[in-house]
Structures are given as structure tokens and as C-alpha cells.
Image (cartoon, rainbow, N blue to C red):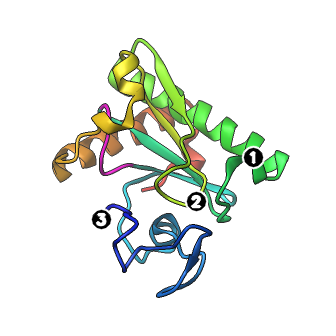
Amino acid sequence: MSWTPDNPALNTGARGANTRLGAMASVFSMIINGDLPGRFVWKDEQAVAFLTIEPVTPGHVLVVPREEVDHWEQLDPELFAHLSGVAQKVGKAVKKAFDAPRIGLLIAGLEVPHVHIHVFQGLSLETFDLANANKNAKPEDLDAAAEKIRSALRELGFGEHVAD
């Protein structure tokens, strides 16, 4: 389910206050809390990482803080540093899992009012355009990509944080 401004189930409004689900209940908070499904590859006390349902490349992962903050520049510096570290580790795993020549990193902050870092194969400038996302990704392809990334995380020595 994608967040859209006119979707009453997920509409959090311009300031992040959700009129149906309570204050600050973003779609990412619902995934983190288990209210919506997610293909998690990483979990720790401060952050999670899961596959987006609309990838620009196979293995497109979102690194998300458990704490809901709308704008990345409002993050506590220590949390931002932690998210960057998780994104780097996940990026190494995506690179290994897909034999990617380069890994892209993007903070857009436009669609979901909850900070998230996109980690994906940076195959070309077009892959940095989220409008090129695959809106019809097959669940079995997403499942396979998640498992490849989990396996790579284990091989890289990050097994304690791998989400099964």
C-alpha cells in the first residue's frame, strides 16, 4: 500500500498528525510495529531496514529510524550517524548480493513523513529518479531480493542484526 495524500487510511497530513490513526502514525511506523507487512533485512534498537514495494532496482532498501521524525535535518546527530552506518552496511550487502557496480543513497523526504534513506543499485542517473520505480514488483521477486540481502549481511559479519 503506497502513501498518498488522498488515501484516508494513510493520510498523515502536511505536518504528520494523522487524523484517523493518532498522531504521527506513518505507514513506516505501521510497518515497524507489525500493523502492515514488511520485508525486513535489518533490525536494531534504533533502526530497521526493509525492502520498498516499489523498487527502482532489485534490492532497493529503505533504512528507517524507529523514532518517527519527519525531516532528516531534525534528527539527533547521533541517530543520523547511526542511520548512515546502517545504510552503509546494507549498501555493502546490496552490492554483494546483486554484484552491483555502485550503490546509490538518497534521502528524498517527500512521500512519507518519516525519515528514510533509500539504498539501491546506482546503475545510472535514471535509478536516482524515484518516478522510475517499479510499481508492479512481484512479491516473489521482493522476497528473493530480501533473502539475498540477508544472506549477504550474514556473510559480511552483521548476522546479529539480520531480520528473519
Q: Which mark is residue 114?
A: 2
Neighbor class of circle 1 (other Cα within 10 Å; few <14, some 14-19, many 20+) is few
Secondary element under disc 1, as helix, strand or loop, is: helix
| Residue shown at 49% from the left, 58% from the top | 112
Magenta run includes residue 66 = no
Q: Quadrant of the N terminus?
A: bottom left
Q: Is residue 86 above or below residue 4?
A: above
Q: Is residue 127 above or below residue 130?
A: above
Label 3 or label 1, whichever comes before in sequence order? 3
Q: Position of residue 160 (x, y in %)?
A: 59, 49
Q: Which mark is residue 1?
A: 3
Numbered marks: total: 3
Residue 33 left/right relative to 136: right
Q: Mark 2 to mark 1: distance in Å?
A: 12 Å
Q: Is residue 9 above or below residue 102?
A: below
In magenta, the rendered stretch is: 52-57
Residue 43 visible in the shown view: no
Q: Quadrant of the C terminus?
A: bottom left
Q: Amino acid at mark 1?
A: Glu
Q: Amino acid at mark 3?
A: Met
Residue 32 left/right relative to 7: right
Q: Amino acid at mark 2?
A: His
Residue 101 left/right relative to 145: right
Q: Mark 3 to mark 1: distance in Å?
A: 27 Å
Secondary element under disc 2, as helix, strand or loop, is: loop
Asked whether the residues under the numbered discs 3 and 2 touch, taking CB atoms below 8 Å apart as contact, a structural biologist would say no
| Residue shown at 56% from the left, 67% from the top | 14
| Residue shown at 37% from the left, 72% from the top | 36
Secondary element under disc 3, as helix, strand or loop, is: loop
For mark 1, what is the residue?
73
Q: Which mark is residue 104?
A: none
